[in-house]
């Protein structure tokens, strides 16, 4: 095994897909066993990978066809996963969870699609504690958070891609030439053509929030029409009608996990400053240039995240009043 071998997102993805050499796969297993945080991180990534994979399968299905085609595709994917390590059980479990979730989505999607001719509006509600993934007729994907609902017109076509939201959802909008996609919620609108963003708008909350992951969106409300850029968060106060734009790390903000691949510490700690509201400085510019590869979770404490990064990069940290100083 290469002495410079380090565990990052690319390595974990190759491990999940069964493509690592035996020695590197064994190193990942040791890393997985080292802490509960590592186990949780890998299992979350595994679930996200297969959920995304299955969502893409559903995008390419004809909603008027039987679900048998989807089941066959999922079964074929499962057969292709390598099973040479004991972690294969975790992979298979994540695959089953993702497959089950999206089979339910497909059933709901086909039902809505076939029933849309008889009703003016389709509504989907996420009850309980689990997310619900919906594939809209234009192949856009919506991950609906618990206690949230969306509705859209039965004639959801290229000329009428309008969704109403009450709650919180992650949107991955399919590009349709010459067609805009609009999400409405409590006096605010997000207008896009093809992009990925989260939108939060609960009826009992005074704030509407949107975070852009990639692409571009226009945030519109009374007196406002704002072009939002990736890694920006919009906070709209429905009472005062004020809008605040905040720079964030969108992936950490939306997913709660951020994987770095050979990125300088100045960029890594900038993300930590946003997440934890702290002030991090370097003792030397050369320290800020040191590269870090690894994954940080928002569920970690600040000290835990600092430990992960400094131990990996051979640096240290100390507290100096309200500042955290990174030392080589």
Image (tube, rainbow, N blue to C red):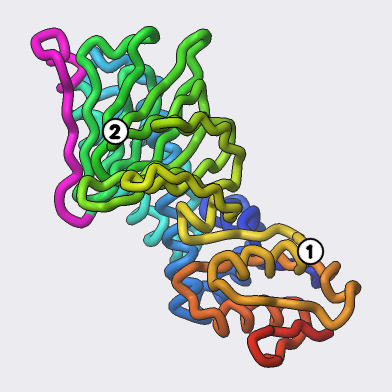
Q: Nearer the viewer, residue 203 or 69?
A: 203
For the N terminus, give its image quadrant: bottom right
Residue 50 visible: no
Residue drawn at (71%, 58%) of the image = 261
Instruction: Looking at the image, tell me whether mark 2 or mark 1 is earlier in sequence order.
Output: 2
Image location (x, y in percent) of residue 191? 45, 25
On the image, numbered disc 1 is attached to which residue?
Answer: 264
**Span of residues in magenta:** 111-129
Q: Position of residue 145 (x, y in %)?
A: 28, 48
Describe residue 327's horizontal placement relative to residue 301 as left or right. Answer: right
Secondary structure at numbered mark 1: strand
Q: In this figure, what is the number of numbered marks?
A: 2
Q: Quadrant of the C terminus?
A: bottom right
Q: Is residue 72 above or below residue 178?
A: below
Residue that appears at 32% across and 30% down: 184
Nearer the observer, 4 or 234: 234
Q: Residues within 10 Å of mark 2 (few under 14, many from 20)?
A: many
Closest to the observer, 115 or 202: 202
Q: Which residue is mark 2?
A: 134
The secondary element bearing badge 2 is classed as strand
Residue 314 lies in quadrant: bottom right
Q: Is residue 23 left or right of residue 239?
A: right
Residue at 55% across, 79% down = 302
Q: Quadrant of residue 66?
A: top left
The verdict on residue 123 being magenta is yes
- Residue positioned 39% across, 9% down in the render: 158
Give the image location of residue 244, x and y in percent: 51, 49
On screen, residue 274 versus residue 174, left or right, reads right
Relative image position of residue 205 (x, y in whole percent):
26, 52
Judge whether residue 229 is colored magenta.
no
């Amino acid at each position: 095994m290469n002495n410079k071998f380090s565990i990052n997102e690319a390595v974990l993805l190759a491990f999940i897909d069964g493509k690592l050499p035996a020695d590197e796969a064994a190193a990942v297993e040791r890393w997985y066993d080292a802490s509960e945080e590592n186990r949780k991180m890998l299992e979350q990534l595994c679930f996200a990978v297969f959920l995304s994979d299955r969502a893409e399968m559903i995008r390419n299905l004809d909603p008027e066809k039987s679900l048998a085609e989807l089941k066959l595709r999922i079964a074929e994917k499962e057969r292709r996963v390598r099973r040479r390590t004991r972690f294969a059980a975790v992979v298979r479990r994540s695959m089953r969870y993702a497959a089950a979730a999206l089979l339910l989505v497909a059933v709901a999607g086909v039902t809505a699609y076939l029933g849309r001719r008889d009703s003016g509006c389709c509504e989907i509600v996420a009850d309980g504690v689990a997310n619900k993934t919906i594939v809209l007729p234009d192949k856009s994907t919506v991950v609906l958070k618990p206690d949230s609902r969306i509705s859209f017109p039965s004639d959801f076509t290229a000329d009428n891609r309008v969704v109403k939201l009450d709650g919180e959802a992650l949107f991955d909008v399919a590009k349709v030439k010459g067609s805009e996609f609009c999400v409405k919620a409590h006096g605010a609108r997000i207008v896009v053509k093809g992009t990925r963003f989260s939108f939060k708008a609960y009826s009992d909350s005074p704030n509407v929030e949107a975070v852009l992951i990639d692409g571009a969106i226009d945030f519109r409300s009374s007196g406002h029409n704002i072009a939002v850029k990736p890694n920006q968060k919009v906070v709209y106060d429905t009472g005062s009608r004020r809008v605040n734009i905040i720079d964030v790390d969108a992936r950490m903000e939306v997913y709660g996990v951020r994987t770095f691949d050979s990125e300088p510490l100045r960029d890594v700690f900038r993300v930590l400053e946003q997440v934890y509201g702290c002030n991090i400085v370097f003792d030397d510019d050369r320290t800020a240039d040191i590269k870090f590869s690894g994954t940080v979770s928002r569920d970690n404490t600040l000290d835990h995240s600092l430990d992960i990064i400094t131990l990996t990069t051979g640096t240290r940290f100390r507290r100096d009043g309200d500042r955290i100083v990174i030392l080589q």
